[in-house]
Amino acid sequence: MAMSYGLPVVATSPAAEGMHVRDGIELLVADSASDFADAVVRGYSDAALWRTLSDNGLANVRTHFSFDAARAALRCVLDGVPRA
């Protein structure tokens, strides 16, 4: 949900599964408490990284999780056409 508002996201590996994301591109992945805290500080402190995560996260949500993406997936299922 945060990603859909353009907020940079830090997530664990299991949380990121199935989200079509890459570490450092759409979000930051951290699996230990200290790595998670470091990633939060890094994302907050680096304006360029914040912008990258924000822009790419929004694009990811648009591509994979928006109403348009859901509509296209449903249309493929109903029409029996595999998704690209």
Image (cartoon, rainbow, N blue to C red):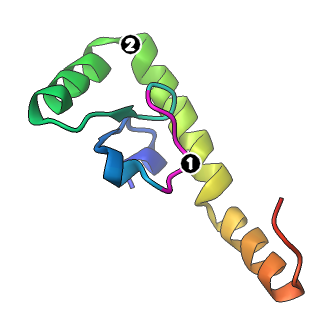
Image location (x, y in percent) of residue 21: 52, 41
**Element marked by disc 1:** loop
Specify whether 83 is left or right of 10.
Answer: right
Of residue 19 and residue 56, the one placed in the foreground of this image is 19
Specify whether 55 is left or right of 50.
Answer: right
Q: Earlier in the sequence, mark 2 or mark 1?
A: 1
The residue positioned 56% from the left and 33% from the top of the image is: 56
- Tell me if label 2 and label 1 are in contact, CB under 8 Å: no
Image location (x, y in percent) of residue 31: 22, 38
The residue positioned 55% from the left and 31% from the top of the image is: 55
Residue 69 lies in quadrant? bottom right
- Examine the rendered structure and indicate whether residue 52 appears above or below residue 62: above
Q: Amino acid at mark 2?
A: Ala
Q: Which residue is mark 1?
A: 20
Q: Amino acid at mark 1?
A: His
Of residue 76 and residue 17, the one placed in the foreground of this image is 17
Q: What is the crowding at mark 2: few (fewer than 14 residues within 10 Å), some, or many (at least 20)? A: few
Q: Which residue is mark 2?
A: 47
| Main secondary structure along the magenta-highlighted residues | loop
Q: Residue furthest bottom?
A: 78
Of residue 40 and residue 5, the one placed in the foreground of this image is 40
Image location (x, y in percent) of residue 37: 14, 28
Specify whether 49 is left or right of 60.
Answer: left
Image location (x, y in percent) of residue 33: 10, 35
What quarter of the picture does the C terminus occupy?
Answer: bottom right
Residue 68 lies in quadrant? bottom right
- Examine the rendered structure and indicate whether residue 21 appears above or below residue 75: above
Q: Nearer the viewer, mark 2 or mark 1?
A: 1
Where are the magenta residues, as a range? 18-23
Specify whether 72 is left or right of 24.
Answer: right
